Amino acid sequence: MAVIREPAQDSKAPQPPREATGRGSAAGPPATFGQLLRARRQQLGLSLAQLASRVHFDRGHVSKVETGKRPPSVSFAEACDRALNVGDTFTTIATALEAAARQQQGWVRPAQLPAAIHHFIGRRCYSRQLDKVLQGDEQSLAVPVGVINGPPGVGKTALAVQSAHRAINDGHFADGQLFVNLRGPGRRSAAAPFDVLEDLLRALGVPAEHIPATLEQRAATFRSVLHGREILLVLDNAADVQQILPLMPGSSGCAVLVTSRSRLPGLISLVGAVTLTLPELTRPEAALLIRSIIGDARADTDPAAVEVLADRCGDLPLALALAAEHIVSHRHHSAGTLATDLKPEHARLDLAAGDVVLRQALDASYQALDKQTARMFRLLGLLPRYAINAAAAAATAGVDEEDASRMLRTLASAHLIRHHGERHYQVNDLLRAYAARLARQLDAAPERTEAMSRAAAFYLR
Ligand SMILES: Nc1ncnc2c1ncn2[C@@H]1O[C@H](COP(=O)(O)OP(=O)(O)OP(=O)(O)O)[C@@H](O)[C@H]1O
Ligand SMILES: [Mg+2]
């Protein structure tokens, strides 16, 4: 363990007895963190077990820190400061020790978060929940994990990045932030954890020649490098749980934020994640998003048209942002003219700005479906706006009800349809237009007609 000079003492700071440090005078030989800790504990008449229970670390951990066999983490030091009522004495020491260790080991403090977006709108209640996750639970040894899932383009990444920046500004995760695009939802396009771990280890300063050759070893090295550090890991666009698990840190000073178009079934039971499902914006928030991009002057010329435009965009942030950017880049367009252009549902799919096209953003979710479920989704696009259940879907697709029920669950998990009550589902206008366009492209006319007739017969019955 590193030997440190005792920090300046104040009235609250521990006053180790001479025999504990061997210190002859106030300016005597340096004491270690462990020696100071033991001295203060003994001064208060606490046993190892009593201190362990106050700081919520196990007795063995406290003993190893006291004897210098284990370096103190900053979170351990914070707990000691609180438990022993010594201001920030131990935190100061542990922070210095960590800084020294970092320098010695060529520790790199990664700062990979992308910039937060300029005008972030709404999401207060979701932000509060994520703040709580990122603040962590002092009593828990588990790594806090927050998952944001929701439909394509609903603002999952924007919310994760916003929350991460807020936590950092509040002084959390002093050892850095890691951000990875996991390229979900399709399994084929998704980043392999093996490669992701290589990038992460490099970002943490591990030289290429020390990066192990197997997935398990890489994952173990990643956890080792993170041990004792306070790092925030943002896993954006996760495909599934298998992709995420090898990337999980092991130490509770770290935290993880995951975004995914999938509900990631299984993650809650495996890592105890706090899961938020992000809906579209409220109508006033959607109108505000358009206003924040096109500016007050243009919005004020026809506020009602801004609301209609928000409605035509289904209050979906991606569609809203693309629509607003379209207005900004076409001087003669207004919210009113664009809202009129977008009256036909299929026209909304072609909203685009730069190289982002709304339809293509949806493709990734569709392409991740198995063949049968993809066909079911296309056929659902041909139905009117009714709520559908497994029986209706089975009739439309000409499959048995059990299969239909499984496919509906898959579609709901991918946020391509949504629950409407316990047994019913609904497809929103944008996704229905998207599914219908695919059906017209991929399913022959007779097959579409038959599906519609089966659906009509079902509803008549
Ligand atoms: N709360 C918000 N306020 C303002 N703009 C937002 C907000 N949420 C999202 N946006 C904008 O909407 C667009 C889509 O957001 P984002 O990329 O976060 O969606 P996503 O759900 O992560 O999409 P994907 O499913 O493709 O990963 C971006 O241009 C983003 O800036
Ligand atoms: Mg995203």
Image (cartoon, grey):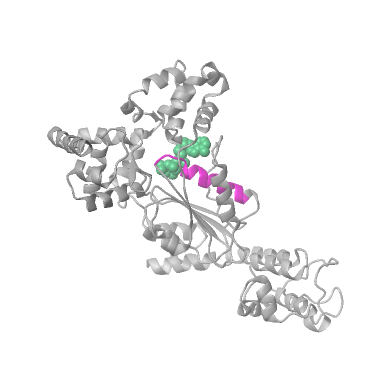
Q: Compared to 55, does 405 lie above or below? A: above
Which quadrant would residue 105 be assigned to in this image?
bottom right
The answer to whether residue 153 is magenta is yes
Q: Position of residue 84 (x, y in %)?
A: 75, 71
Q: Position of residue 255 (x, y in %)?
A: 54, 58
Q: Position of residue 372 (x, y in %)?
A: 21, 48
Q: Residue at x 45, y 24 (%)?
A: 308
Instruction: Name the outermost residue toward the left.
Output: 446
Q: Residue at x 82, y 66 (%)?
A: 8
Left or right side of 175 for 10: right
Q: Position of residue 97 (x, y in %)?
A: 67, 67
Instruction: Name the outermost residue toward the front.
Output: 461
Q: Compared to 70, does 363 lie above or below? A: above
The answer to whether residue 328 shows anywhere in this view is no
Q: Residue at x 56, y 65 (%)?
A: 252
Q: Compared to 325, does 374 lie above or below? A: below
Determine the main secondary structure of the stretch shown in magenta: helix
Span of residues in magenta: 152-168
Ligand 2 found in image quarter: top left
